[in-house]
Image: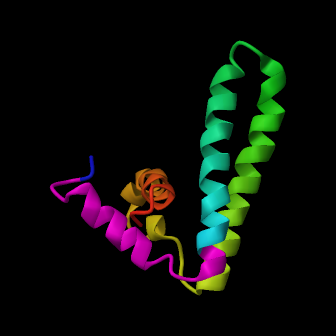
Amino acid sequence: MLGNRPMGDWIAQYSQSHQHPVNRLCHSFGIPMIVVSIVMAIAGFALPVLWMPAAIVFVAGLALQFLGHYFEGEPPEFFKDWRFLFVGLRWWIAKMAGKA
């Protein structure tokens, strides 16, 4: 799905387009919020009461990411290549591990 490029190349390109400190901060919170919202939505099949909180957390996480790109002055990478939708979480993990 990510082609023949190593994941390190994807993360490096993603990191390059996320240089502004506000953008990095927004993504540091927005990405895990989106992941949590997806888990909540899946759990919502068993507990429907989770659907609305999942939607709110998802929209808030996405809003943080777009706010960050406002400060960056650049559009999100996934506007150029949809595969970057799958790179953000790997970037966040690398960032938390001190490697991005």
Is residue 70 placed above or below 44 in the rendered structure?
below
Residue 84 occupies which quadrant of the picture? bottom left
Residue under the image location 62 percent in, 36 percent down: 38
Query: Which contiguous range is marked in magenta?
Result: 3-23
Is residue 79 placed above or below 70 in the rendered structure?
above
Residue under the image location 76 percent in, 55 percent down: 60
Residue lying furthest front: 98
Coloring scheme of the render?
rainbow
Residue under the image location 60 percent in, 42 percent down: 35
Residue 6 occupies which quadrant of the picture? bottom left
Residue lying furthest top: 46
The answer to whether residue 51 is left or right of residue 73 is right
Residue 11 occupies which quadrant of the picture? bottom left
Magenta segment main secondary structure:
helix
Is residue 59 placed above or below 73 in the rendered structure?
above
The answer to whether residue 74 is left or right of residue 57 is left
Looking at the rendered image, the quarter that the C terminus falls into is: bottom left
